[in-house]
Image (spheres, rainbow, N blue to C red):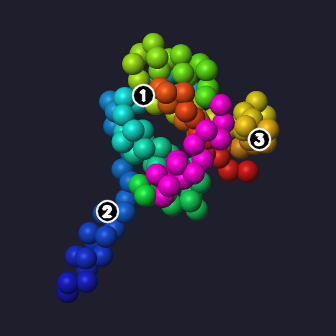
Amino acid sequence: MMLFPALFLLLLTSCWIQPHSDEYEKIGDSYYFYDYDSMKTFLIYQINETFTDWHYGKTKFDQRYKEYINNIDPNEEDLDNIKQNNFSYAVRTGTSNKSVILKNEKKISGKYFWITTKSGNSIVFFRT
């Protein structure tokens, strides 16, 4: 009898609920956030919906964020919007038309999530 409530609680803590639209602003293909936690909650949900076999949680997201930070140059348009509107993070989403290139000159083909920060750091999550 105790097994069912425990499994139910485990299921609830592992689910990601899509963030409310008041936690970000959307301008064009980019979403803008005032803080890391709102950006992370939004992005984990989007990544898990798009790349269904990745199964990111908070810890895995933080690990990958640190591991891949600055694997791409900042998106200049997003950086300008961040500075003009006092945001901290931008997440540009899209499907590459071979115009998104990593610092190692590898071209991204497919869906991506390109983060640009107020301090000029950037990271892109993508799948080849």
Residue at the image position 61 percent from the left and 38 percent from the top: 70
Q: Which residues are magenta?
A: 60-73
Residue at the image position 20 percent from the left and 84 percent from the top: 2
Q: Could you tell me if residue 49 is visible in this image?
A: no
Q: CA distance from mark 1 to mark 2?
A: 27 Å
Quadrant housing residue 108: top right
Residue at the image position 41 percent from the left and 55 percent from the top: 58
Which badge, 1 or 3, comes first in the chain's sequence?
A: 1
Where is residue 25 drawn, in percent x and y? 41, 25
Three-letter code, disc 1: Ser
Q: Which residue is mark 1?
A: 88
Where is residue 109 drawn, in percent x and y? 75, 42
Q: Is residue 90 left or right of residue 77?
A: left
Residue at the image position 55 percent from the left and 33 percent from the top: 121
Three-letter code, disc 3: Asn
Mark 3 neighbour class, 10 Å CA radius: few under 14, some 14 to 19, many 20 or more: few
Q: Are marks 1 and 3 in contact (CB under 8 Å)?
A: no
